Amino acid sequence: MSLKTSFSIKSVEFKNRVFVASGTFGYGDEVGDAVDVNSLGAIVTKSLSLKPRAGNPPRRITETPSGMLNSIGLANIGVEKFIQEKLPYLRTLKTSVIANIAASSVDEYCRVLQLLDAEDGIAGYEINVSCPNVKEGGLSFGTDTKKVREITEKLRALTERPLLIKLTPNVTHISEFARVAEEAGADAISAINTLVGMAVDLRTRKPKLSTVTGGLSGPAIKPVALAKVYEIVQAVSIPVIGIGGIASADDALEFLIVGAVAVQIGTMNFVDPSAAITIAKGIEDYANRQGYNDVGDLIGTLDANIEFSPLHSWLH
């Protein structure tokens, strides 16, 4: 019997459980000559806002031990140019396309989704709620449960397509935000977005990023991401997609075992654009070795009921 790798969120079937994360794979058309994008479970596009955004001034990216800091500032071509210039190519692909939406107001989120929802070729939406709310002093939407609820409810009313809410880890209890999103109609949770981080140039005594702080990603954040995903899985019944520091099939399998239904590969794409395909193959190899007929049978198989032996029993 061949191994089943596909799964569904709402009405959309994905061919496997490995996606490429927003902001790390462009709009999906930049690496077609180097990578078989049709082998991906899904492409999550670079964030889209209503109007084009230039993003933050340089320097806006810097390497860190086991990771990277970025302060790109949601630079993008804008939703209308995306529809005109990028979507025709994406429609030719045999993999699902999830449009990531970023905005500075609730109204902007709604308008971007409405424009996209009128088009074919988009499987669903991932809503980046880590954006600054310009109408309320720049506070991130994702750190306010009331705003997460409002955004989710309003977008839910505008589409029948799958709605994924991407949560920030920069809160005390991420599960509270996941529950609110579920109650408001989200079909799935994506977690986590980047952690707030900073780096200093000792020669100049200046921050290495023009914005002082930025988003930390890469292998350094995997333990945090894994713990946050585990926390969310315990709190909601909708699917959770794990993101954060995944660099190998082993990393991805940890997320599946703690309960994520799928994973997204982010920073590793900068190292190897075909990483997601390699990781998907590694997951399949593991499932076959373990005797599974469906990769989905791995989901949530964590045995957390660990009994530790008394200290003296292994010291003697």
Image (spheres, rainbow, N blue to C red):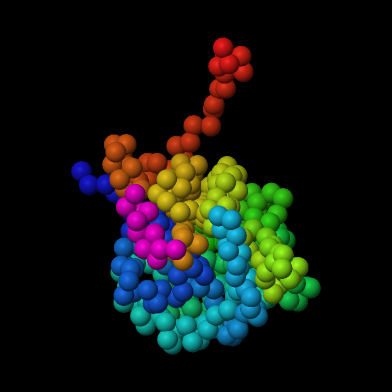
Relative to 310, say whether 138 is above or below. below
Q: Position of residue 210 (x, y in %)?
A: 69, 74
The answer to whether residue 34 is seen in the rendering is yes
Along the line of sight, the residue nearer the viewer: 144 or 76: 76
The region drawn magenta spans 271-282
Q: Quadrant of residue 130?
A: bottom right
Relative to 79, say whether 205 is above or below. above
Name the side, left or right, on which 137 lies relative to 44.
Answer: right
Residue, x 52% and y 70% (percent of image)? 23
Q: Residue furthest front?
A: 203
Residue, x 36% and y 63% (percent of image)? 274
Name the side, left or right, on which 74 lies relative to 117.
Answer: right
Along the line of sight, the residue nearer the viewer: 78 or 179: 78
Q: Residue furthest right?
A: 137
Name the side, left or right, on which 278 lies relative to 165.
Answer: left
Residue 277 within the segment the image draws in magenta = yes
Residue, x 45% and y 70% (percent of image)? 25
